[in-house]
Image (spheres, rainbow, N blue to C red):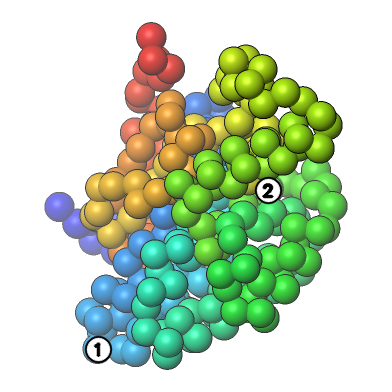
Amino acid sequence: MELPVFLYGFYERHLQRSLSPDSIPKHVGVMVDGNRRWARQFNAPTSQGHRAGADKIHEFLGWCRELGVRVVTLYMLSTDNLNRSTEELAELTAIIADTLDRLDSDPAVSVHAMGAPEMLPDHLAERLERLTAKPSPSEPIHVNVAVGYGGRREIVDAVRELLRDALAHGKDIAELAENLDVDDISRYLYTAGQPDPDLVIRTSGEQRLSGFLMWQSAYSEFYFCEALWPAFRKVDFLRALRDYAGRQRRYGA
């Protein structure tokens, strides 16, 4: 049941007070889904939905900073999304480029790009390359932007780089295969050196991973929200955190 608008402020503050700082996930992955459906609800152009979704990203990062989330991974553009119409893709990549520029200019955020830049338009690939080349200082919040990203491709890229590195150092491939373990592959993932996500959120009511952080999310908790991404509210995020705080993480035990 929806609460009257004037009660949301009270409910939001109640939820936030109920959360212990120790229960806040350190790394949250978000599948920012539902921009196009949100636009259709208002008979608006698809680009308006993507722009509203981009604005929501910056609002969401403000909530994360306030609540103490240290790492956020945003699924902004998958390799499958690259099959969309040329017109929509041009609008979407321009909006993503603007979003990356805004993130890059925020002194409280460090940004890491993850994906396959060679599959993207030059203007977007150049921005991603520039972000990846930048040092990542210890800022209040670290943001991974998954653009041109596919989970299966990430694992293939990791194995490919592991083999190339082994050959470059004259290692025996048969011996490598015999002794290969999970950590060996983790060191070559796009998120190498970062903690795995504690919580993965998907908006829009869809309940699937769609290739997002397939390796890293092996022991993550998942939360599926009915709200479309541009309509995702702080109270929805707090509900996700409350749900996460009430779970007992077992890590396969």
User: Looking at the picture, how far across and down is residue 141, in whole percent?
Assistant: 68, 48
Residue at 80% from the left image edge and 49% from the top image edge = 136
> In which image quadrant can residue 163 be found?
top right
Quick one: SS at disc 2?
strand
Q: Is residue 148 above or below residue 9?
A: below
Q: Is residue 38 above or below residue 202?
A: below
Residue at 73% from the left image edge and 46% from the top image edge = 140
The outermost residue toward the left is 1
> In which image quadrant can residue 169 be found?
top right
Number of marks in the rendered image: 2
Q: In the drawing, what numbered circle is on residue 200? A: none
Which is more toward the observer, 224 or 188? 188
Which sits earlier in the primary sequence, circle 1 or circle 2? Answer: 1
User: Looking at the picture, how far across and down is residue 134, in whole percent?
Assistant: 82, 58
The outermost residue toward the top is 253
Going by the numbered disc 1, the residue's amino acid type is Asn
Q: Is residue 240 above or below residue 25?
A: below
Q: Is residue 17 visible?
A: no
- The residue to which callout 2 is attached is 142
Going by the numbered disc 2, the residue's amino acid type is His
Q: Would you say 149 lies left or right of 158 here?
A: left
Q: CA distance from mark 1 to mark 2?
A: 35 Å
- The residue to which callout 1 is attached is 43
